[in-house]
Image: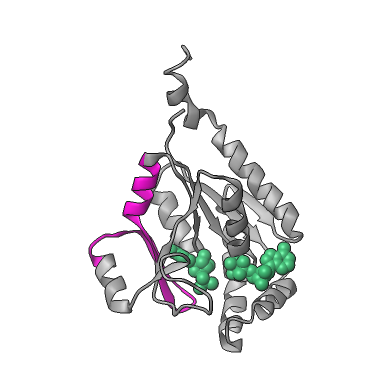
């Protein structure tokens, strides 16, 4: 049954575990893909251009902003990040679900201009645990970690306008909750009714 692709927008303070959750959830739902963002941040060890991000220079990023190629973009922790508008439109039309791992500023922009998105906020169990996870990831400098921790409390205040909140304490429980949200959203009447009308008088 044909339906439009669903847009799942996930935000969380850096270090909460949203990248890890997003990677796992993609393996569970065959129709779900990760939307690859553009960023001016340098790649971390192990990150691959085109898979984790499209790593671009500031000039190229500015050109894309000017050309209206982003559905949303924002400066986060001192770097620029943006989502391609064409990617969102293409996947919606093809019926492919997309998961976007973006910050609150970007999520707000999308909520204002892209209909039908599902907004999910992931919280860490505590700020102390968030610090432990950022240190444990050992991919950022002390200074970068401190900046991310000090931004976390402002980001957490944004959680109240999201559709769902998931606390990533025990990883498997958080994953089950995320899975449940996706399954429920796929059963929403407004997503299915047009497709069903071809089979039933409904
Ligand atoms: P984010 O994408 O939100 O910045 P990551 O997915 O990179 O965060 O996770 C940050 C670190 O925390 C990683 O080392 C990851 O393995 C770890 N992590 C993720 N979820 C949990 C969890 N529920 N319990 C303990 N560690 C976790
Ligand atoms: P990181 O540098 O740790 O990969 O990501 C830092 C922050 O940037 C995270 O909060 C992540 O969600 C956010 N981010 C990643 N891609 C985008 C994007 O395309 N747009 C916006 N607004 N934020 C993004």
Kindly identify the residue that appears in the image at 61 percent across and 83 percent down: 146
Examine the structure image and report whether residue 13 is included in the region drawn in magenta.
no
Q: Where residue 198 sits: x, y (%)?
A: 42, 18
Kindly identify the residue that appears in the image at 57 percent across and 45 percent down: 29
Q: Where residue 161 sits: x, y (%)?
A: 56, 52
* Res 74 quadrant in image: bottom left
- Residue nearest the viewer, comparing 31 with 135: 31
Res. 21 visible in picture = yes
Res. 13 visible in picture = no
- Residue nearest the viewer, comparing 172 with 69: 172
Q: Which residues are magenta?
A: 66-93
Q: Where residue 11 sits: x, y (%)?
A: 55, 60
Q: Taking 116 as reference, is 82 above or below it?
A: below
Kindly identify the residue that appears in the image at 67 percent across and 81 percent down: 135
The outermost residue toward the top is: 201
The outermost residue toward the bottom is: 142
Left or right? Give the position of 49 relative to 46: left
Left or right? Give the position of 202 relative to 113: right
Q: Where residue 48 sits: x, y (%)?
A: 46, 71
Colour option used: one colour
Kindly identify the residue that appears in the image at 33 percent across and 54 percent down: 85
Q: Taking 147 as reference, is 92 above or below it?
A: above
């Amino acid at each position: 049954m044909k339906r439009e692709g669903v847009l799942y927008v996930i935000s969380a303070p850096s270090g909460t575990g949203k990248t890890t959750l997003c990677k796992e959830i993609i393996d569970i739902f065959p129709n779900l893909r990760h939307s690859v963002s553009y960023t001016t941040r340098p790649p971390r060890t192990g990150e691959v251009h085109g898979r984790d991000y499209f790593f671009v220079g500031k000039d190229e990023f500015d050109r894309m902003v000017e050309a209206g190629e982003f559905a949303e973009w924002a400066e986060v922790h001192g770097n620029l990040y943006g989502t391609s508008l064409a990617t969102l439109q293409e996947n919606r039309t093809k019926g492919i679900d997309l998961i976007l791992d973006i910050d609150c500023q970007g999520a707000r922009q999308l909520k204002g201009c892209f209909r039908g998105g599902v907004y999910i906020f992931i919280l860490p169990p505590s700020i102390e645990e968030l610090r432990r996870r950022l240190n444990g990831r050992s991919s950022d400098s002390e200074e970068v970690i401190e900046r991310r921790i000090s931004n976390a409390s402002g980001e957490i205040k944004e959680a109240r306008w999201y559709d769902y909140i998931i606390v990533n304490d025990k990883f498997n429980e958080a994953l089950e909750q995320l899975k449940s949200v996706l399954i429920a959203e796929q059963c929403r009447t407004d997503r299915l009714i047009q497709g069903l009308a071809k089979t039933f008088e409904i």
